[in-house]
């Protein structure tokens, strides 16, 4: 299954394309990746990028590239993922530095939550590093609540990961 295209007022969420990878790799090599993948060289970043895109074939959900509808610029990605070491399906997001602080992540994540709800999927969680204040604020803005009793990804502790549970509203 390919990623369906989702649109919002300002964004197009579309399947990842090879042209998106250089910006993604630059992000992964920077300190901005410390809260997500950790700093990765281009080869390892490619594996992350390809796995998120390939999740569509395996699970029927995966990564969308976030594109500015007005300019066509690649802004980052939003994804539903459930790798084997995650106990639950996760909603995650990554924005390129110039896109931060403009509400793009909230807009993209809301569109994905709406898509998942319309499909009849259960609400996902977000696994967030405790020091990632911006992502914690976004999870709360999306209506997610901290779930201290939720199972953590394999090998992680509460010092590594905080779980925020999303809820679908009718």
Image (cartoon, rainbow, N blue to C red):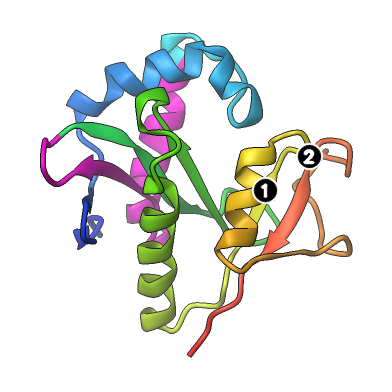
Return the x and y of residue 28 as percentages of the image width and height. Answer: 48, 19
Residue 50, quarter of picture: top left
Asked whether the viewer can see residue 89, the reply is no
Q: Which residue is drawn at 19% across and 59% down?
A: 5
Q: In this figure, which residue is indicated by the disc labeled 1?
A: 136
Residue 71 is one of the magenta-drawn residues? yes
Residue on which the image places disc 2: 130
Residue 27 appears at what percent x and percent y? 44, 19
- Residue 110 appears in the rendering: yes
x and y, in percent, of residue 119 in the image: 37, 80
Say the numbered circle drawn on residue 83. none
Mark 2 crowdedness (10 Å alpha carbons): few <14, some 14-19, many ≥20: some
Label 2, secondary structure: give it.
loop
Q: Could you tell whether 167 is left or right of 100 in the image?
A: right
CA separation in Å, label 2 and label 1: 8 Å
Report the front residue among 43 and 109: 109
Are the residues tagged 2 and 1 within 8 Å (C-beta)?
yes
- Residue range corresponding to the magenta coloring: 44-72
Q: Quadrant of residue 120?
A: bottom left
Quadrant where the N terminus sits is bottom left
Provide residue 135's location: percent of width, then percent of height: 61, 44
Front residue of 34/63: it is 34
Please tell me whether mark 1 sits on a helix, a strand or a loop. Answer: helix
Residue 50 part of the magenta-drawn span: yes
């Amino acid at each position: 299954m390919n990623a369906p295209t989702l649109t919002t007022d300002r964004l197009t969420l579309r399947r990842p394309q090879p042209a998106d990878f250089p910006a993604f790799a630059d992000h992964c090599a920077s300190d901005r990746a410390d809260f997500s993948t950790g700093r990765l060289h281009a080869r390892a970043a490619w594996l992350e990028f390809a796995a998120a895109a390939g999740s569509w074939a395996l699970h029927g959900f995966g990564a969308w590239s976030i594109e500015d509808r007005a300019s066509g610029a690649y802004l980052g990605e939003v994804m539903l993922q459930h790798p084997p070491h995650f106990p639950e399906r996760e909603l995650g997001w990554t924005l390129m530095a110039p896109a931060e602080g403009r509400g793009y992540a909230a807009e993209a994540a809301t569109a994905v939550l709406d898509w998942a709800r319309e499909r009849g999927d259960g609400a996902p969680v977000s696994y967030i590093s405790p020091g990632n204040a911006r992502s914690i604020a976004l999870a709360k803005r999306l209506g997610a609540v901290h779930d201290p009793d939720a199972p953590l990804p394999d090998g992680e502790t509460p010092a590594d990961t905080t779980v925020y549970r999303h809820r679908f509203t009718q």
